[in-house]
Image: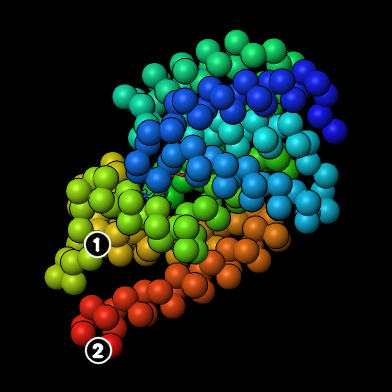
Amino acid sequence: MLSNRQKEAIKQTEHFVYHLLKEDASGHDWWHIQRVRNLAETIAAQEKEAANPFIYEMAALLHDVADEKLNRNSESGEKILFDWLHTIKLEKKEKEAILEIILNISYKGGTNKTKLASIEGKIVQDADRLDALGAIGIARTMAYTGARGRLIHDPDASYSRENLTLEQYRSDEGTAVMHFYEKLFKLKDLMNTSTGRKIASKRHDYMENYLKEFYEEWEGNR
Ligand code: ADP
Ligand code: NI
């Protein structure tokens, strides 16, 4: 159960994050945050190991604030995050638990191999990854592709985007379809929780079917 102090911290943090991300059009907007929160709740409710709702709610709310893609660089993003954690009233161990999750959650093209230790971290990371999959995942990928001025698909592209460095992963070469292979189809095997794995598997199959249909239409077969 959340204390009144914790409820107040969540309310203030909602407000803070809403204003920070409401205008992002690259798939990391406020509604991504809301979906991650809801997914975290769903996973927590089904997992056997008890999770602290204050920690996973706060981590879900703040997980993209310091993202290097949404800030000039990761240092300026982290400063915004640290300043905020200093502004609201948190216990030292709450602050540590939340920071531990946020600073280690990002996929970064598969270059981030850190395993999250806490159940709350595992839940939020799964929730964030699930929002990259399925119908929503496809929409976000297309939105990001458009925001970066990239192509949906290029059947002539010969460059492989497997095993990328972070720099190559963020580079402007990829297409939306490549992103399915360089990241999205890898996620179902990287889930931390059994609930996350179950949901990921459904969303994965949906995306595979989507791409089958996509290639058929691309060729003008139907
Ligand atoms: P993280 O923030 O965990 O490092 P990303 O920023 O790579 O993860 O991915 C967040 C979402 O943004 C992806 O799930 C995808 O929808 C979109 N995205 C990121 N990079 C690309 C890309 N190169 N092409 C298309 N979509 C992308
Ligand atoms: Ni996210």
**Rendered position, 211 above or below 114:** below
Query: The C terminus is located in which quarter?
Result: bottom left
Query: The N terminus is located in which quarter?
Result: top right
Ranked by sequence position, the earlier of labels 1 and 2 is: 1
Task: Please provide percent x and percent y for residue 214.
Answer: 31, 76
Q: Which residue is mark 1?
A: 152
The answer to which image quadrant residue 199 occupies is bottom right
The kind of residue on which mark 2 rests is Asn
Nearer the observer, 30 or 81: 30
Residue 222 falls left or right of residue 82: left
Identify the residue at horizontal 57%, vertical 42% (top origin).
34
Identify the residue at horizontal 46%, vertical 21% (top origin).
78
State the mark number for residue 98.
none
Identify the residue at horizontal 35%, vertical 43% (top origin).
26
Q: Which residue is mark 2?
A: 221
Task: Look at the numbered disc 1 and give the secondary structure of its residue.
Answer: loop
The answer to which image quadrant residue 94 occupies is top right
The answer to which image quadrant residue 179 occupies is bottom left
Task: Please provide percent x and percent y for residue 146.
Answer: 25, 51
The kind of residue on which mark 1 rests is Ile
Q: Residues within 10 Å of mark 2 (few under 14, many from 20)?
A: few
The span from disc 1 to disc 2 (Cα, nearest Å) is 19 Å
